[in-house]
Image: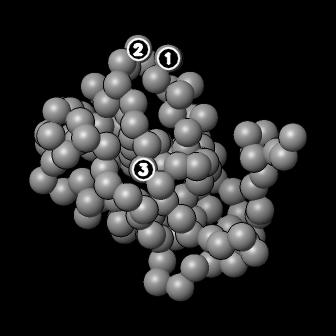
Amino acid sequence: PDYILAGANGGLVPAAILKHALGVESIGAVQMAHYNRERTRKKGGAQMYGLLPSPIRNRYPRHILVVDEVVETGDTLRTLEGELDGFCPRVTWAALYLKRHSISGLPEHFFFARRVDPETWLKFPWETTV
């Protein structure tokens, strides 16, 4: 990839690690939300806040790697897939965890590190309050 797009907030740390590991120079983020502060699902599925980063809007990247920490329903991926449509010829998707029994309905180029039970609440080191 020539650009990494992190799904903020959870995808920021994994995206930064992949940026260094893959030697990718350009990175950006888009704010996505599925849950509110009470850890209950927002109505209407995933929501994107703000605009896509300017390199994407200016059609600079030829291959974007979208990184997030966890995929539960796939709503975030589908929302971003719609937002990215027409901006970049190639998009690859990566997540640390998949909380689905099936990957049907997810983007074609989707990779994940580990599948976990959908009822598992994941807590990441970067979410710890100092």
| Residue 111 x, y percent position in the rendering | 45, 44
For the N terminus, the image quarter is top left
For the C terminus, the image quarter is top right
Residue nearest the observer in this picture, 70 or 106: 70
Which residue is located at x 48 percent, y 49 percent?
Answer: 7
Visible residue check, residue 104: no
- Residue type, mark 1 in image: His
Label 1–label 2 contact, CB within 8 A? yes
Which residue is located at x 29 percent, y 37 percent?
Answer: 64
- Residue type, mark 3 in image: Val
Q: How many angstroms separate mark 2 from mark 3 (CA)?
A: 21 Å
Which residue lies under the disc numbered 1? Answer: 20
Q: Residue furthest right?
A: 130
Q: In this view, does 75 lie above or below 94?
A: below
Which residue is located at x 54 percent, y 58 percent?
Answer: 71
Which residue lies under the disc numbered 2? Answer: 23
Direction from residue 123 to residue 116 in the image, left or right: left
